[in-house]
């Protein structure tokens, strides 16, 4: 989340941490396709970040500029969510890209990251991964008039995320059903997610959920996401592999 003098709107809770780096990364770039990883919290554009894993709209824009004109993008998401405005901006940027977009939910797409995941033309979720949806929130101070306005603003902001969910519903699912889920912080495993959204369940993969400490601040986080995991036959979590690859890429510049 972004540290700001204004009242930002979030779909999740953040933690202060480190200076500005980025694990937003493009890999396996060929003449026709590329892999794009969104691993970390979704934050507003700023000159610094709470944590090196944070992903800003500017990070996504730079990555998309690298892959402009490709036929296919494979987008891997493992994120606990973050800023609504940043997430909607990222969703819109990905949606505008003309490549065929295949999204893979690695571990978790929670909060506004669940919206970003729906930018895919095809969306795949391993049988042991999760989506989570809930209403946006913020913190506020002020008099009764101020607080009523903020509540009204939150209702309007929520419509942006709802519009994306409605575009990706399984036939027969009603808006009232999704609204009830948003009102109650609903965690969906892959099979459950496929009952409501146009996602395809695939074979289970072992991924460490992104930002475990961050996920602890949700009310109903599945315990399986709070237990640190490493990839099979590997000593380092996948996100550490991505970090190392980024460092090697910088050395090659």
Image (cartoon, grey):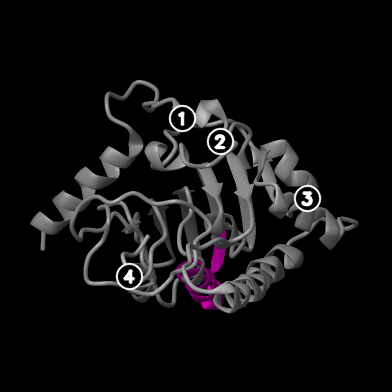
Quarter of the image that includes the N terminus: bottom left
Element type at marker 1? Answer: helix
Residue under circle 1?
226
Residue 233 located left or right of residue 193: left
On residue 196, which mark appears? 3
- Other-residue count near label 1 (Cα within 10 Å), few / some / many at <14 / 14–19 / ≥20: some
The residue at the far right in this view is 172
Q: Residue at x 64, y 51 (%)?
A: 133
Q: Is residue 19 above or below residue 211?
A: below
Q: Tell which of 195 and 174 is nearer to you.
A: 174
- Other-residue count near label 4 (Cα within 10 Å), few / some / many at <14 / 14–19 / ≥20: few
Q: CA distance from mark 3 to mark 2?
A: 19 Å
Quarter of the image that includes the C terminus: bottom left
Residue under circle 4?
4
Q: CA distance from mark 4 to mark 2?
A: 27 Å
The magenta stretch spans which residues? 86-102
Residue 178 located left or right of residue 189: right
Q: Residue at x 55, y 49 (%)?
A: 110
Picture coordinates of residue 13, whole percent (x, y): 45, 51
Q: Which is closer to the viewer, label 4 or label 2?
A: 4
Determine whether label 1 and label 2 are within 8 Å by CB: yes
Picture coordinates of residue 228, whole percent (x, y): 39, 27
Element type at marker 2? Answer: loop
């Amino acid at each position: 989340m972004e540290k700001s003098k204004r009242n930002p709107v979030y779909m999740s809770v953040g933690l202060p941490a480190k200076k500005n780096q980025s694990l937003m990364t493009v890999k396996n770039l060929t003449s026709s396709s590329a892999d794009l990883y969104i691993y970390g919290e979704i934050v507003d554009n700023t000159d610094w970040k709470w944590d090196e894993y944070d992903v800003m709209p500017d990070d996504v824009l730079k990555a998309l500029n690298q892959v402009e004109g490709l036929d296919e993008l494979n987008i891997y998401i493992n994120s606990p969510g973050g800023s609504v405005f940043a997430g909607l901006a990222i969703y819109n940027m990905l949606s505008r890209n003309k490549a065929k977009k295949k999204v893979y939910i690695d571990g978790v797409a929670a909060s506004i990251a669940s919206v970003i995941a729906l930018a895919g033309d095809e969306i795949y979720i391993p049988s042991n991964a999760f989506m989570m949806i809930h209403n946006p929130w913020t913190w506020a101070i002020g008099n009764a008039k101020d607080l009523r306005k903020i509540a009204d603003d939150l209702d309007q902001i929520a419509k942006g995320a709802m519009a994306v969910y409605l575009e990706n519903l399984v036939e027969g699912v009603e808006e009232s059903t999704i609204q009830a889920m948003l009102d109650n912080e609903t965690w969906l495993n892959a099979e459950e997610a496929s009952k409501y959204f146009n996602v395809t369940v695939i074979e289970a993969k072992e991924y460490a959920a992104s930002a475990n400490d961050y996920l602890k601040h949700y009310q109903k986080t599945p315990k399986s996401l709070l237990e640190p995991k490493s990839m099979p036959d590997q000593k380092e979590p996948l996100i550490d592999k991505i970090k190392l690859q980024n460092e090697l890429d910088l050395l090659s510049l």
